[in-house]
Image (cartoon, grey):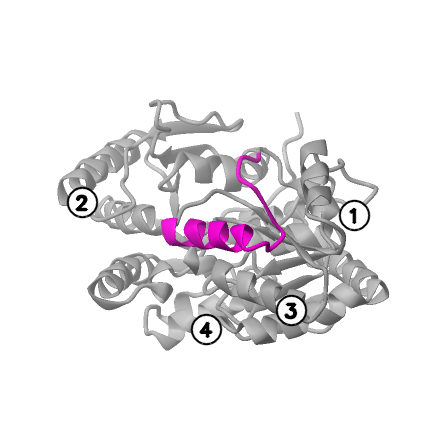
Amino acid sequence: MLVVTSAVTVETFLPGLVRRLARSGWDVTIACSPAPDGAVPSVPGAQVIGVGMRRDPSPVADLRAARGLWSAMRATEPDVVATATPKAGLLGTLVARGRRVPVVVHLMWGLRSETLAGRRGRLVRLLEGVATRYSHAVVPNSASLATELSRLGMVDPRTVTVIGSGSSHGVDLARFRPAGEGAPAPPAVVSGLAELGAGPVVGFVGRLTADKGITTLLDAVRLLRGRGQNVRLLLVGAAEDLAVTDRIAVERAAGLPVLVVDRVTDTAPLYQVMDVHCLPSLREGFPNVCLEASACAVPTVTTDATGAVDSVLDGHTGRIVGRGDPDALADALGPLLDNPQLRARMGRAARDWVEQEFGAELVERRHVEYLAGLLGAPVGAEVTS
């Protein structure tokens, strides 16, 4: 049984892993919250059970969710329960241990408490610690996240494993392709960028929130423009932070060339118009967007934040700078924007790296082999029929 909080997470992170598990002979059940309309996602190879879980603490709702998970596990009697995301990790781990599930694994995809302060930060860290301390095994999706969990005393180092080079599900190398090989960007995006004028494009893909470092990126682009570089900024993602949304609006009104694309069903074509990808994040688990950009042969500039620091080979596939530092970010972006040959060299190296370490099929196979090893099950040939 795979337990995650959100139906969106199921649709985004789990289909490939489920397919690989099913082909390897596993009987897979997923427990997650239904979508807002009450529907549960359809995932080939898995039974999906709707169990409502709220992201924020809610004693009544959490008790109801725990009862739903208890019923689901009683009905399926799983040999392995693998949880991911904070609320599912908390409730799924406690219920699985209460039902004496033989193997309980927490897939750690980030440390939400890392950028929370005060009482809320302490509460979230306490809840995150339940999943990491009471699981039989913890799988952080990056080496730096594993290090941070150990530093905070949230895990027994003997229970922690980073699978391969990290990542929760890798990148689809056939879908994310270099410019000219992948699907072209939508005409509306191309024309929208053209209206901003000339110059190379710095692209960001992700939630438009403070945690992602959007204000630092806006400051860096303003600095670059002040230095005479005609850079344009493409922000791809949903606005989830009113303060960040207001800041973007202020910068656009002041003349900063920013295009926001907030409703995207497929991000792959958007990388085709980027010259440099930038993720100035303050915290991550292992950012999939950096793998997507790399697969498209676009170099990335990111930060030394947990998780983000693992997603770039500094000086080889992109650059790593200190988090929250717009001057350092501008200094790293500038040479890449000025030098097409440097961008091309780093982009080729980035594509080679993801082909070697982060292809989705490789990452999924490593996860299945790891889970089978925990259970002591043989890893045989996949069922192809």
SS for dot 2: loop
- Quadrant of the rendering where the N terminus is positioned: top left
358, 338: nearer the viewer? 338
Which-is-in-front pick, marks 2 and 4? 2
Which-is-in-front pick, marks 4 and 3? 3
Q: Amino acid at mark 4?
A: Thr
- Classed neighbour count for the residue bearing mark 3: other residues with Cα under 10 Å, few (<14), some (14–19), many (≥20): few
The x, y position of residue 167, in whole percent, is 56, 55
- Quadrant of the rendering where the C terminus is positioned: top right
2, 226: nearer the viewer? 226
Q: Name above or below for residue 171 compared with residue 47.
A: below
Instruction: Provide the residue designation for mark 1.
Output: 178
SS for dot 4: helix
Q: Which is nearer the N-term, disc 2 or disc 3?
A: 2
Instruction: Provide the residue designation for mark 2.
Output: 58
Instruction: Provide the residue designation for mark 3.
Output: 226
Say the numbered circle drawn on residue 147: 4
Asked if the residues shown at circle 2 and circle 1 are in contact, with their CB atoms under 8 angstroms apart, the answer is: no
The x, y position of residue 10, in whole percent, is 46, 37
Residue 60 visible in the current orientation: yes
302, 231: nearer the viewer? 231
